[in-house]
Image (cartoon, rainbow, N blue to C red):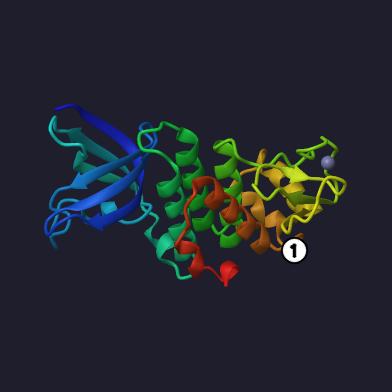
Amino acid sequence: MPQAHASALVLSTAPLNEQDKLVCLLTSTHGLLKAVAPGAAKMKNRFGSLLELFTCGDFYFYWNEEKELATLSKGEIKESFFDVISAAGNIFYFYLIAEIVLKFIPENLHDERLYKLLLAILRSRRGNQSAMDWLLLYFLVWFLRSEGLLFNPKQCASCSAALLDRAWVRRDYRGLLCASCKTDEPLTLGREELAYMNWTAHHPPGESGVWAGRFQPASMIRLLVGKIEFHGEFALQSSRYLQEFR
Ligand SMILES: [Zn+2]
């Protein structure tokens, strides 16, 4: 039975049967990993609060030859974010973040950046360094960047002219257009929003507060969530609970 050990964040936990739960982990070394947590559905179990959403822990698991899923044998909490996640003003934003990762990222694809990005966002929120909507926007920009799907905020995708005051989003979400190349594209990004995309490349999420008041993040959040849904060919369910989508 091959065994492994990984640091990971819990992205979802669901009952599998009367006794066991199915856990989805974003690991620092194996990408997304689904594992059975034996006995976790019982009131008293060895995992305790280890399997709460976005708990950061050290997890030990093994594979049975005949079974597809890994089995979680034990784990230890390294950092609990229960207070951050359970706060009423945060929880639905983190549901959306977890849903995006779970639906978009293939299993077992190693990319440590995403794990580090989520940890940085959780810690920034706990330290109250930045408002939750700005942290979601930061996540969306970096998620798209790490997937190679972020717009180039500097030049028109059609004629390569520099984008200055305003850019129009192509209907297939693949690039931004200048005022000369646009036709009837309804979605646009303004000067500050374009500058923000550049800014995220060199600043941590906790510094997002410097943007408050320069533009409202809601419309860019809707735009980038729409882009993720378009490329992923799915509809996200958690966004409906956010004020940005009402
Ligand atoms: Zn152009």
The x and y percentages for residue 211 are 72, 56
Is 151 positioned to the left or the right of 167 in the image? Answer: left
Mark 1 vs ligand 1: CB under 8 Å? no
Q: Can residue 89 be seen in this view?
A: no
Q: Which residue lies furthest to the top in this view?
A: 2
Residue at 28% across, 55% down: 13
**Label 1: element kind:** loop
Q: Rate crowding at label 1 as few (under 14), some (14 to 19) or many (20 or more) other CA atoms within 10 Å.
A: few
Type of amino acid under label 1: Gly
Q: Residue at point 41% right, 31% down?
A: 110
| Count of marks overlaid on the render | 1
**Horizontal and vertical percent position of residue 117:** 51, 43
The picture places residue 137, in percent across and down from the top left corner, at: 60, 54
**Residue 166 as seen in the image, left or right of residue 196:** right
- Residue to which mark 1 is pinned: 213
In depth, the one of 75 and 102 nearer the eye is 102
Ligand 1 occupies quarter: top right
Where is the N terminus found, in terms of image quarters? top left
Residue at point 50%, 63% (across, down): 239
Residue 152, image x, y percentages: 71, 39
Residue at image position (36%, 53%) is 80
Does 20 appear above or below 106? below
